[in-house]
Amino acid sequence: MSATIIRNGRVIDPANKHDEVVDLLIVDGKVAPLSQLPTLSSQPDEMNAGGLIVAPGLIDMHVHLREPGFGHKETIESGARAAAAGGFTTIVCMPNTSPVADDPSTIAWIKSRAATAACVNILPAGAISKDLAGEELAPIGSLAQAGIVAITDDGHCIQNHELMRRAVEYARMVEVPVLDHCQDYNFVGNGVVNEGYWSTLLGLPGWPAAGEEAIVMRNILLAELCDHHIHCQHVTTAKSVRLLREARRRGVKISGEVCPHHVALTDEAIQNFDTNYKVNPPLRAQTDVDALLEGISDGTLSILASDHAPHADFEKEVEFDAAPFGIIGLETELGLFVDLLVHKHRRVDIVRLIEMYTAEPAKLLKLEAGTLSVGAPADVTLLNPDLEWTVQIDKFESESRNSPFNGWKLKGRAVRTIVGGKTVWELD
Amino acid sequence: MRIVESTTTSLSGDAQTAVRWNRKDLLGLRELSVDELNFILETADAFKQVGTREIKKVPALRGKTLVNFFVEPSTRTRTSFELAAFRLSADVINISATASSLTKGETLKDTARNLEALHADILVLRHSSAGAPQFLANRLEASVINAGDGAHEHPTQALLDLCTIREKRGKIAGLHVAIIGDILFSRVARSNIFGLVKLGAHVTLVGPSTLVPREFEKLGVQISHKIDNVLPSADVVNLLRVQHERQRKEYFPGTGEYTRFFGLTKERAKLLKPDCLIMHPGPINRGVEIDSEVADGLQSVILDQVTNGLAVRMAVLYLCGGIATT
């Protein structure tokens, strides 16, 4: 038997609407009732969490781990360490690897690699279409049996509405949620930045907001038609928020997530052609940022995620047009969101923020994780919402450094990450 | 390092030069101050007369190496820079995209650093990606001169347009300049807008709504889609090439319709004031954006632009090349 007791923390467990200063008992890797304390055969290890929040282990449902195929950007091992250092105990990895995660054997490989190398829980997402080509369905049923938690062609978007309809219908049968990267290729063309003032000024090809909104609208129609959940990944525009708000009020099974860079930055940041600000979907205008904040505070946007997208320095250090899209986020997202949403803009309280990182994704993906219910896996994040710190990219656990937040001073961060009752990361 | 027998006072001393110019690179006109713009134009005026001499050469950049690095095809701009460098006594090599190692997969950064390792002092870059010159300028000791980057800026083209307007009309402030054509994809338009607005001109952009998006109004210019309403009050019309090669064809229905709505035809040219200047950065599509006779007519200053391009590029190479070594 192994047991740990976390003393004096403010335990926030949104799934159980629980928020009080109380001790948390962990026995054999699971959350145990405090009533079990007197019956333990030996004294539990003590951990003092005075002044800290004790939250269910955070879940990031949008991460690129790059393995198999692109180990020079990130590995399952390094990505997991980065997750732990950001306060995350469970991450969902996207299928745009090489080979693409469109086959049960690739899912099996990821799971076995994660079992030996990863210090946090790795949950793979499978592809919707073979080779992410948007032409024929991947074996979604077999992928579900192999253990995926969702399907997505993230990084790509199925343009053929009929194919997407069949994918959603099929996914309903095998009970996996559909995640979608919303991008209409005809609208977007070779766009690399938000179409607006800055694209006009800099002569960079524009990626119009309508390129996202057209697919958000398509997905609302398909969620209704197929009566199955579609989750819109990395929502960025004001009209997307409006469409989602209206649809959710009508009870449509649709949801949206927000990434930290889309609320921390606007497209003004691209003016020096720094490719660390090149991301897909692109950084938008201030009116879009305002709408995202509004969508977060009224519950339209219910999930927070990083879209952690590592790239090597030599890949990013090229002409703006030629650089790959992507920003890493695992080690900065919690700090950015606590700083911006809780402290600076006061859009949500810390309880709701934790819910958007735990109960909300757990409900969507039907996970055991994301709660501190008795019997749940003892995945716990200790966080200090008032701790001030400075982002230093040279201290990152990630293999990559493509973050535009180096040097940012943030308020709020995780201080200890516990997976299955074991501490996997602790702030120095 | 000094222009021999300079007739203007602005080049009379290094101290003054240092105050008015301290950039090693010319990346665009957006970041230049009014004083810097005027200083380049004054310096260009000083160089104009060099071209009219029997010996068309000054020793200002003797011993310096200039690399014309063109990662996008160009004949006219490259030749102009090459000749400008020769007239300043620099050594020049030309590298084009097909000849360079870029086709072998070497990155732009590595290629440029290799050129610098060969002690290139000035790199003149033409590139299809907006921001490529800034990317190199941030990483190299050498001077980087933007010879056109994507749809971003083409500063020496706009400077030669400004130089020509000043030469012909004696001023820029207060003039009404119409820029007509494909604005969205035009680096010439952007650099002209930045330069003209800074120097006090009134600018109207004219063209189809797909190629002249409203966002441009935020740059301090007016937009019109009716050329006949604009021509009568224009002091300068600058016609841009309709760039078929760069466009997906959805932007306008075809060159026939373009000419009908926006071409400077003989008939339309009658709407112009007698002293209105007709400009074009070239190469001209005769019969598309401008009728042949209008291009060759008395109001056309298209060839003066080419001549002034040489003086402007000498000025830019002289100013930036001087800073790079000090």
Image (cartoon, coloured by chain):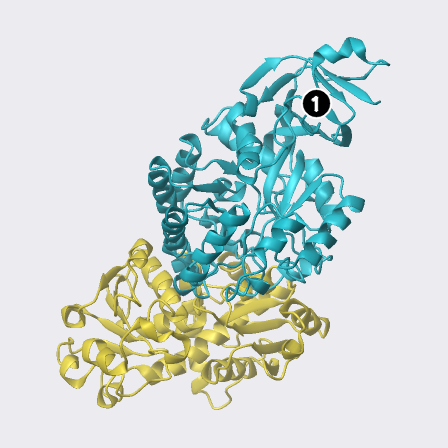
Chain colours: A cyan, B yellow
Q: Quadrant of the C terminus of chain A?
A: top right
Given residues A387 and A338, the one toward you in this image is A338
- How crowded pointer 1 is (Cα within 10 Å; few <14, some 14-19, many 20+) is rated as many
Q: Residue at x 35, y 70 (%)?
A: B162
Counting the numbered discs, the total is 1
Disc 1 residue type (three-letter): Val
Q: Secondary structure at mark 1?
A: strand
Whether residue A10 is situated above or below residue B3 in the rendered picture: above
| Left or right side of A246 for A181 | right
Given residues A216 and B178, the one toward you in this image is A216
| Left or right side of A228 for B166 | left
Name the subunit of mark 1. Answer: A
Q: Position of residue B14 (x, y in %)?
A: 55, 63
Q: Residue at x 19, y 83 (%)?
A: B265
Q: Residue most toward the right?
A: A42
Q: Position of residue A120 (x, y in %)?
A: 72, 39
Q: Position of residue A38 (x, y in %)?
A: 78, 8
**Residue position marked by numbered label 1 in the rendering:** A31
Q: Quadrant of the N terminus of chain A?
A: top right
Q: Residue at x 59, y 38 (%)?
A: A333
Given residues B295 and A239, the one toward you in this image is A239
Q: Position of residue A408 (x, y in %)?
A: 60, 38
